[in-house]
Amino acid sequence: MRIQFVCLPLLVLSAALLSAALLSKHVSIKSRYDKFKKQHIYKEMTANMCDEVMRERKINPIKTKKCKKINTFIKADEQTVRSICVSEGEPYGAMTKSRQGFDVVVCIRKTKKGIMRIPFACLLLFSATVLSQDASITPRYRKFIEQHVNGRMSENRCDSVIGSRRISKTNSNECKETNTFIQATTNHIKAICEQAGEPYGDMTKSLQPFPIIVCTLKNQQGRLPNCQYRGQARTRRIAIRCEQGFPVHFERDIIHFEN
């Protein structure tokens, strides 16, 4: 939305107030996310470390020095936990539920008898606000995953997967001429934007090859849901466009490299 002002001083003042509001919101989310990490993420946590870690991280009820009755530690790295808010979770009321089980350690305070520690695996629920990712990146990252990531993809599933995910040319029901699926997890692909990739013009190229399925349209001029494809398995290094550490899609297929 574009807003025009007649008075330049008002424009400057409004822009300053808007910037301050956005900064305040970002700082608020970051501080809550930092608190969430401190209280609940510890990959090396074990059942006999509750006393030590709770004391070291000063985890207690808000604005008190009393011992917290219960606290759960997720035994995973920060990026894996964050992925629940992006691609590895599903809606659960106002929360987001992990699709896979996680190992956790639950520390429960017992009056006069110390703390009881219970390690087990469970599904996790998170508020999506812990993710401070730019709102403009999230839908493009989700679209990238929907169109190009399927760890269980095979050559004979092009029609069913493209149909069920309703993958088509942008803003139309026309069948895409080609669509490529990467047979890997979202974390492995996201790693290309970090330590597992190298610059390639304005793209990022994977250091290692990935198994992929390339679906090529057979019935030209076809439209959803009647798109028919021929699948071909390949192993290629791939190039993706990364923004803010996330792979995004820009209306073209992923580039392939011959080994």
Image: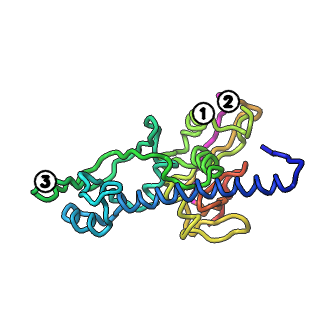
Above or below, 101 against 76 in this view is above
Circle 2: residue type: Leu
Give yes or no for residue 137 being in the magenta stretch: no
Circle 3: residue type: Thr
Which residue reaches farthest right?
A: 6
Q: Earlier in the sequence, mark 2 or mark 1?
A: 1
Identified at 88% across, 51% down, the residue is 7
Camera-nearest residue between 152 and 232: 152
> Magenta span covers which residues?
225-235
Identified at 46% across, 49% down, the residue is 84
Residue 198, image x, y percentages: 62, 71
Q: Earlier in the sequence, mark 3 or mark 1?
A: 3
User: What kind of element bears circle 2?
Assistant: loop
**Residue on which disc 1 sits:** 163
Pointer 3 with pointer 1, Cβ within 8 A: no
Q: Quadrant of the C terminus?
A: bottom right
Residue 224's disc is 2
Pointer 2 with pointer 1, Cβ within 8 A: yes
Q: CA distance from mark 3 to mark 2?
A: 63 Å
